[in-house]
Amino acid sequence: MSDTGNGAPEETPAAPAAPGAPATPADKAAELARLAERIRGIERQGADGPGARIPGPGGSGSGGSGSGAVSAPAPAPAPASAPAQRTAEPVAPAAVPPASPATAAVPDGPRGDALQEAATVLTAGGAPAELAPAAVAEFGDEAAQRLRDDPWAVLGLPGVRPEHADGFARGLLGPGAEPGDRRRAQALVLWLLEQAVLRGHSALELTEVAAGLERLRMPDPAAAVQAAVEDGRVLPFQEELTGAEAHTAGGEDDEPPTRTLLALERLAMAEDTLAEALIQLMATFVPGEDPEPGEDQAADEPASAEAGTEDGDAEDGDAEDGDAPAGAGEEAAPVAPAAPGPAAWEAAAEAAASSSSTALIRAVADSALVLHTGGEAARAEPAALVAAARGLGLRAWAATWTDQGRDSFAALVEGGTAGADTPVATLAELLSGAAGPGRAPDGTLALDLLVVLDAPLLDVDLAATVLESLADGTRLVLSGDPGQLWSAGPGRFFADLLAAKVCPAVASRTPDFGPIGELVSGVGIGELQPVEAPDKEVVILTAKDAGEAVHRAIQLLTDSIPRALGIPAEQVVLLTPGHGGVAGTRALNAAAKARLNPGPGRFGGFDPGDRVVDSPSPGVTHPARVLDGDATGLHLEYADGSRRTVRPAEAARLRHGWALTVHQALGRRWPGAVVVLPEDAAPGLTRQWVYTAFGRGERHLSVVHAAGPALVQAVAERPAQPRTTRLRAVLAENAASAY
């Protein structure tokens, strides 16, 4: 068994079948087993332990250092204005869609020639010429030649499905477009993994990929996987099974059972880099020490700089010693970072208002990485931590997912509204530099403690970007509600960290109060029980079908809730599982507009007064209201009071905003929420979805459902849609190597 040096095991020819005989299911299963065994054998040579990586193109293994940590180049940082990155949603397979206006804007000159050549090749193969801008954006000026050489490469363009790519290949190659073509194999494996990314997976089991290839009529799935691995854009991994999975799988020869995973190279590198950064952060942390007796600084006086200059004594003393203060244009001497000792931290912990706040402060005193879990009311605990840390002289900041979360957290820290000096910003603002402490000379954030709220919404790419922004030894607290939906992008970063148990985790004991809090808490443990709501805080209604559910929801939005509870319609949101269907966001928004703001949609389908949501990327949603529109675009006023114009080329990302999916509502709450559950939503309902949806209401929650017993079953029996990731295993391996 040897390594080819290109990240793939050498092909070992299988025993040939009889001439002309089709491969049986047993033959295909045996070939997959042989492929998994070859992967396993190479990993035994290259690295020890679960989650080890096959050597890459350079021939190196996963652990380049003596610590055994995974060595991988850092992924490209996510744009700060778009905290969640995900591949564009696939379109219906009826036809290949045209390129978006943003993609279509290509300069003249050589790029114009490349566009024309790409359009010619696309047309020759029967594909829409409108795909040319996307092809040039993806493959560069050589897009036409790339498509000629590999027609199935068109599958990497937005909206293209396997049947489209097969038709395009037949148009260019004729009879030479065979189902078992190596180029087709590579493209289909990549496509299957990209589709898995849309569902939140950062990796897939080998057997799942093989099953997908079978459905796409690939004659030899094992050979297809082999081809994709040799291409280098797909990386294979072996991961040891633990717990119930290991017991079910069993094992041979006293070896622990394993599974073979396949991952896109970019995501594999992101998870490896993320795990390495987390271990580095913990390994470089040095807690402060209490001052020795006789030192000038007392343990209970951390802010020495402020105390020493209160009466000007320190400045006078410096002048008497001949050390003149730095003049204009001179750089001041760097100030040593504050490092409060155990006694100072303990005093801050004892002064905290709740036992959960005390536990969190104590955990942060001793650790670089701390996880904090709890509901909406528990956000007071990281607020107390930020206030305590700043009182100890540390540069402490918090980051939230939305502007609404920022403002509500600022009120907890400062006891009022957010201001210029309030130590909280959205994560996008923090990473972009629009707000926050700024950057140190080495490019890292100039802070000693960062608290990230809404941590379950971080995908692996964004989490890696956050870690890369922190200097060694910085304290990081990740806080969030583990019962809520995960990120729009791939991975389950926060859940994997909790499961890996590589750092302290503090579970809040502060419950969410009131009938809504009681209902949501019950859902969190798998119980959907009626709650007492004397002031109609919770109302659950049934409907015979989706049409009736829409009618009741609109009635609640426009009449019942404003009239009975005094909550204006503009402060009530309709929530539903998806965009399509009889009771999706499109149908609900059309009905709401007809009742609340009828109009012809004269500005690209919108009228002044319409509620809209601006979604610059998946997982990022900004509620707004249309003020007006003209040739320059739609003029919007956002929920935080800011105003901007969305250009016509960007208008496709806008949707009406009376009704949202629950994923669009993440990180926000409304005074009133109406959750609509049509019967066709039943198969996709999970406890995690219901928990998140029900928690979006602050003062009132109405549930209108036609899902029958599926709602109770989802809460009791389906915790979450599963996601396959590697981070937990990589963390466990690297932590074991480092310590």
Image: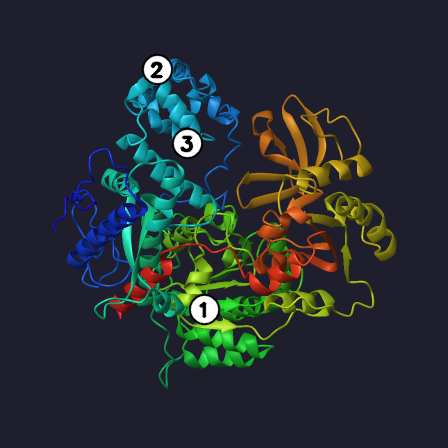
In the structure shown, which secondary structural element does the residue marked by tag 1 occupy? helix
Question: Image point 39% across, 14% down: which residue?
Answer: 112
Q: Is residue 501 above or below residue 191?
A: below
- Residue 512's x, y, as percent? 66, 69
Amino acid type assigned to the residue bearing label 3 in the image:
Pro
Q: Which residue is mark 2?
A: 110
Q: Which residue is mark 1?
A: 305
- Is residue 573 among what the camera can see? yes
Amino acid type assigned to the residue bearing label 2 in the image:
Pro
Q: Which residue is mark 3?
A: 162
Is disc 1 surrounded by few (<14), some (14 to 19) or many (20+) residues within 10 Å?
Answer: few
- Residue 367's x, y, as percent? 39, 71
Q: Nearer the viewer, mark 3 or mark 2?
A: 3
Q: Earlier in the sequence, mark 1 or mark 2?
A: 2
How far apart are the two marked residues, 3 and 2, measured between alpha carbons?
31 Å
Is disc 3 surrounded by few (<14), some (14 to 19) or many (20+) residues within 10 Å?
Answer: some
How far apart are the two marked residues, 1 and 2, measured between alpha carbons?
61 Å
In the structure shown, which secondary structural element does the residue marked by tag 3 occupy? helix
- Is residue 695 among what the camera can see? no
Amino acid type assigned to the residue bearing label 1 in the image:
Ala
